[in-house]
Amino acid sequence: MIRAVAALVCGLIFGAGLTVSQMTETQKIKGFLDITGYWDPSLVVVMAAALIVTFAGYWLARRQTAPVFSARALWPTAKDIDVPLVGGAVLFGVGWGLIGFCPGPAIVDLSTGMPTVIVFIAAMAVGMIANNLLRRHERGSLAAEPAE
C-alpha cells in the first residue's frame, strides 16, 4: 500500500511539473520541434532541469544501502542498443512530432476531456497491450507475468 501511495505522490509531482512548465501544451511541443519557423527553446530548459534533478536523484539513490519502499533496488542492467529500442524511439519521436503529445503530458491532459487526448491514450494503451502480448508470445508463453 505504501508503494502505491509513493507512486501516486510521485505521479502528482511529475504531473504538476509538466503543468507548471506548460509541457502539457501541444503548441509548446510543436513550437520546439519547429526549427525552421518560430522555434520555442523553452523545452530545452525543462529538459535541462529534469536532467539535473535526475542526476541528483540517482546520485542520492546510489548511496543508500536499501530503497525506502522496496526490499531491493531494481537498477536497469540492459545496455544494448537493439532494434526494439531504436524502433520504439523512432515511433515515439514520430508520434510526438505529429501530434505534440508524449505519454506523461497526455495523461495529465486527460482531465481536459479533449477527444484527441482520449484517442491518443487509447492508441497508446492498445500499443502497450499489443507489445506485451507479442513479447509473451515470443517467449512461448501467453500466461500472465507475475506482478512485482
Image: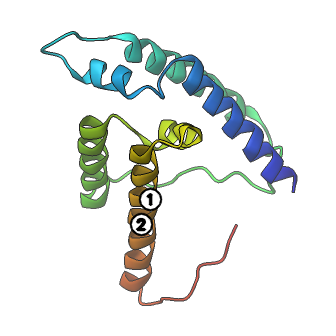
Q: Quadrant of residue 112?
A: top right
Q: Amino acid at mark 2?
A: Val
Q: For label 2, count other residues whose C-alpha is less than 10 Å away and answer few (under 14), some (14-19) or many (20+).
A: few
**Is the residue 10 above or below the residue 45 in the image?**
below
> How far across and how far down the image is residue 17, in percent?
61, 24
Q: Residue at x 46, y 41 (%)?
A: 114
Of badges 2 and 1, nearer the viewer stands 1
**Is the residue 41 above or below the residue 138 in the image?**
above
> Total marks drawn?
2
The residue furthest left is 36
Q: Secondary structure under badge 2?
A: helix
Q: Nearer the viewer, residue 19 or 9?
A: 19
Q: Nearer the viewer, residue 68 or 14?
A: 14
Q: For label 1, count other residues whose C-alpha is less than 10 Å away and answer few (under 14), some (14-19) or many (20+).
A: few
Tell me the tag on residue 126.
2
Q: Secondary structure under badge 1?
A: helix
Q: Amino acid at mark 1?
A: Ala
Residue 55 shows in the view? no
Tell me the tag on residue 122.
1
Q: Nearer the viewer, residue 89 or 56?
A: 89
Q: Quadrant of residue 30?
A: top left
Tell me the tag on residue 82.
none
Judge left or right: residue 135 versus residue 13: left
Q: Residue at x 87, y 51 (%)?
A: 2
Q: Residue at x 47, y 17 (%)?
A: 46
Judge left or right: residue 28 versus residue 87: right
Discs 2, 1 touching: Cβ within 8 Å: yes
Residue 102 shows in the view? yes
